Amino acid sequence: MNNLNNLDLTEDSIKILLIGLDNGGKTSILKCLKGIKGISAYNSLSPTRGLEIERFEALDSKYAIWDLGGQQSYHEEYFNDLENILKGTKKIIYVFDVQDVKRYNLAIDYLNKMIIRIKDLNSIDFSIFLHKYDPDLEFNQELNEIIIDGLIEKIKEVIPPNFIYTLHKTSIYAFFEKSTIT
Ligand SMILES: Nc1nc2c(ncn2[C@@H]2O[C@H](COP(=O)(O)OP(=O)(O)OP(=O)(O)O)[C@@H](O)[C@H]2O)c(=O)[nH]1
Ligand SMILES: [Mg+2]
C-alpha cells in the first residue's frame, strides 16, 4: 500500500478515485479503462491491498487512477486520510456489485460514510456504477430488476438533495463485447 506521506500529491493528470467494497470489480474496471483486453488478466486478480495508484495515458490525456482496495480493514485508514485522498480529484466512481445482494446494505453504508465525510461534493464528478450487470445476467428469486430497483432507491436515500451524480449499469463483459478479445 502506498504511504500517503511519500506521495507527490500535485497531479498533472486527471485523478479518478475508484471506491467500493472488496470484490466489486474496481480493479477490473481500471483495467478496462486502460484498454486491457486479454480475459486472463481479469480472472487472475487478487484483492487490492489498500490504495494502489495506476498512471497511464489515453486519448492524449494523462490519468491517475486511485484504486482503493475495498476490504473493510482499510476503510478507517481511508476515512482518516480522506483529505489527502480527495486532493485534486476530478471524479469519483463508487462501484456496487449488483450480484452481491447479501451485501447491498454494507455497500450502502460504506457509500453513506464516504459521502458524509466528503465536504465539497459538488466540485467532484460523482458516478455510481451498478457493476457486474452482465449482458447474460441470470435473474432469479434473489437477483431481479425489483431487487436492483430497491438498491437504486436506497442509493437515493443516502445521496443529499441537489447533489448531482450519474448512475450506470456496467459490466466488463459488455466491454469485451465492444472489443476484440485476445
Ligand atoms: N460477472 C462479472 N464479474 C466481474 C465483473 N467485473 C469484475 N468481475 C470479477 O469480480 C472479481 C473481483 O474483481 P476485482 O476487480 O478484483 O474487484 P475489486 O473491487 O478490485 O476488489 P478489491 O481489490 O478487493 O477491492 C474478479 O473475479 C473479477 O473477474 C463483471 O462485470 N461481471
Ligand atoms: Mg482491486
Image: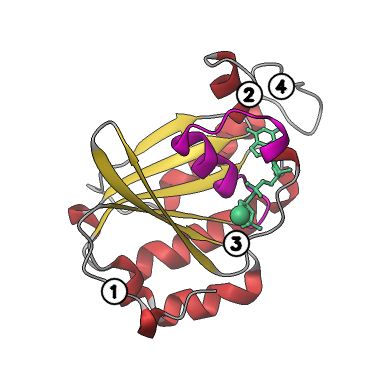
Amino acid of disc 1 = Asp
Name the residue nearer the viewer: 81 or 2. 2
Q: CA distance from mark 2 to mark 4?
A: 10 Å
Residue 137, numbered label: 4
Q: Is residue 96 left or right of residue 122?
A: right
Disc 1 designates what residue? 8
Disc 3 designates what residue? 70
Quadrant housing the N terminus: bottom right
Q: CA distance from mark 4 to mark 1?
A: 42 Å
Could you classify mark 3 by the number of other residues whose Cα lies within 10 Å: few (under 14), some (14-19), or many (20 or more)? many
Disc 2 designates what residue? 173
Amino acid of disc 2 = Tyr
Select label 2 or label 3 by which is in front: 2
Secondary structure of the residue carrying tag 2 is helix
Q: CA distance from mark 2 to mark 3?
A: 21 Å
Magenta stretch, residue numbers: 22-41
Disc tally is: 4
Q: How is the image coloured?
A: secondary structure
Name the residue nearer the viewer: 120 or 34. 34
Position of residue 182 measured from the top left corner of the image (x, y, whole percent): 65, 21
Position of residue 68 measured from the top left corner of the image (x, y, whole percent): 51, 62
Select label 2 or label 4 by which is in front: 2
Q: Upstream in the sequence, badge 2 or badge 1?
A: 1
Instruction: Check mark 4 vs ligand 1: CB closer than 8 Å? yes or no.
Output: no
Q: Is residue 1 left or right of residue 93?
A: right
